[in-house]
Amino acid sequence: MEVTFDNQSNPLSAQVLALHDNSVIYRVVTDQGLWSRGHTYLKDANPAVGEPTNVGVIHWKEKSFEIYGHKKTLAEIRRRPKSRVKKERYWRWGPERKEYTIVYHNEKEWQASLDGEVVATFSVPFRPKLFGKLKPMVMNLGTSALEKDEVFLFLVFIYCEAKRQDKTNASGGWQV
């Protein structure tokens, strides 16, 4: 499954569109407080009945993820390698699930690997352009990633990219 985000550089507030027909699959909505984020919701844009429902939530202050009503802290689902040199992070929703290796590759995309094979990518435009059209953010999920961990990987990629942008924006230059 390949999808694009309609908001070119902000993964925290966007509509997720199917690449083949531009139909909205998910909506990403974030509650912003005065100084920090509250929650980021991943909403199913095409529920069976009624209003769009929350399929996943990032609780920024509590440092936890919630998927279909099941809530887990980052300490439960993420681990870091013992080596400080490695940039990899390991994510697993539960003990019965497989562990994904997440890495920011070549300063242009996030990659999720399973047993050494890349199963999902999240391509992010490097820098905003002053002139010309900016490429959209594109997420590509393989069939093995779609089986059980589609929502989990969406949340992981959104979380990782938001943290990367926070670090980049805070590393110098003008801050607004």
Image (cartoon, rainbow, N blue to C red):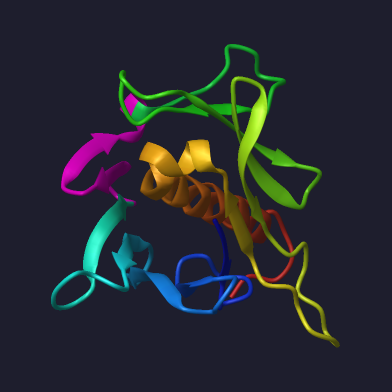
- To which quarter of the image does residue 93 belong? top left
Residue 92 visible in this rendered orientation of the protein: yes
Q: Residue furthest bottom?
A: 131
Residue 62 visible in this rendered orientation of the protein: no
Residue 32, x across and y down, in percent:
35, 71
Nearest to the observer: residue 75 or residue 144: 144
- State left or right for residue 70 relative to residue 55: left
Residue 85, x across and y down, in percent:
72, 20
Residue 78, x across and y down, in percent:
43, 28
- State left or right for residue 96 relative to residue 175: left
- To which quarter of the image does residue 88 belong? top right
Image quarter of the N terminus: bottom right
Asked if the stretch drawn in magenta spans residue 70, the answer is yes
User: Which range of residues does the magenta coloring cover?
Assistant: 60-76
Q: Residue at x 36, y 62 (%)?
A: 37
Nearest to the observer: residue 146 or residue 29: 146
Q: Residue furthest top?
A: 82
